[in-house]
Structures are given as structure tokens and as C-alpha cells.
Amino acid sequence: MPTSRLVREVMPGERDLAALVSGLTVGRRPGRFTLVTLDHPVALGDGVEALIAEAEGVTAVTTVETAIDRGWQHHFDGAWLTLEVHSSLEAVGLTAVVSAALAERGIACNVLAGYFHDHLLVPSARAEDAVAVLEHLRADN
């Protein structure tokens, strides 16, 4: 069996919620994103940005353009925001605080966790509002 190598040496990330929130900045990937469900596996790349295996099938996070080009049914037009703070995988509360702040403003939020960052898919029409909410959250801490 082949062995995998680390892309780079990794640090465990921040655990302190106050430090995470006060150091929070938000990045935005260019493009419009959606989630599709498929009954067959697909590979990352060419517009497929993330995959999640579920009992019901494969969920792919893809660009809206890719979904349209491939004839994949989609119902969400989202912006991809990245919480530019390296939180520990054992940090408690960051996504809860973020999603609660967005919920107070009526902004839907779909969370994806990566090793280095948490990522949010929010409705494209509310992306600027979402960024403003998160900047306000940081400023208040």
C-alpha cells in the first residue's frame, strides 16, 4: 500500500474560542457554488471542490457552472467563505458562534471543516451581509 506524505508540517491550531473569534478574518473564493447529490462517485477537480460520502449518495460541492454543464440538479446558489483562522480540530464553539451570528440575521450557513480552516457556503445574494456580520463579530471580541 503506498504511503502518503504530509503536504507540509502542520501545527494543531488554536483552541481558545476568544482568540479564534478576535482573530477571525473572512476570505471569499471567486465563483458561485452549489451542492449536488449523485449516485455515483466523481473526482475532485474540474469544478468539483469537495466531496462528502453519505449513506444516500455522494454530495459534491461544485461550481454552479459545473452543475449546469453536467446536467446536475441543484437548488442552491452560494458564495464560499473561508474563516481565515487556523482552529484546532478540537476547538469548541467557533462554528456555533459563527452560525448563530449568521442565523440572527437570517443568513443560511452550510459548514465544511477542513484541517486548516472552516468553510461556509452562504446564499450568494447574502454574501456581503455574511462577511459584514462576521467582521462585526470579530470587532465585538
Image (spheres, rainbow, N blue to C red):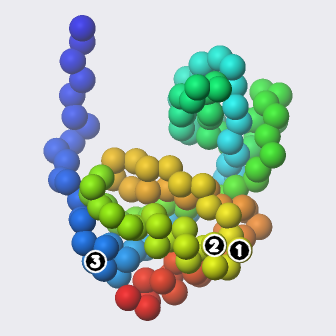
Dot 2 and dot 1 residues touching (CB under 8 Å): yes
The answer to whether one can see residue 128 in this image is no
State the mark number for residue 106. Answer: 1
Q: Amino acid at mark 1?
A: Gly
Quadrant (top left, top right, bottom left, bottom right) of the C terminus: bottom left
From the viewer's perspective, tell me whether residue 80 is left or right of residue 126. left
Q: Earlier in the sequence, mark 1 or mark 3?
A: 3
Say which residue label 3 marks.
19
Residue at 71% in and 36% down: 36
Circle 1 or circle 3, nearest the eye: 1
C-alpha distance separating marks 2 and 1:
5 Å
State the mark number for residue 103. Answer: 2
Q: Extreme top residue here?
A: 1
Residue 77's place in the image compared with 47, above or below, is below
Residue at 60% in and 55% down: 110
Q: Secondary structure at mark 2?
A: helix
Residue at 57% in and 29% down: 54
Residue at 68% in and 48% down: 33
Instruction: Find residue 117 and report its image quarter.
Output: bottom left
C-alpha distance separating marks 3 and 2:
22 Å
Closer to the camera in the image, 62 or 51: 51
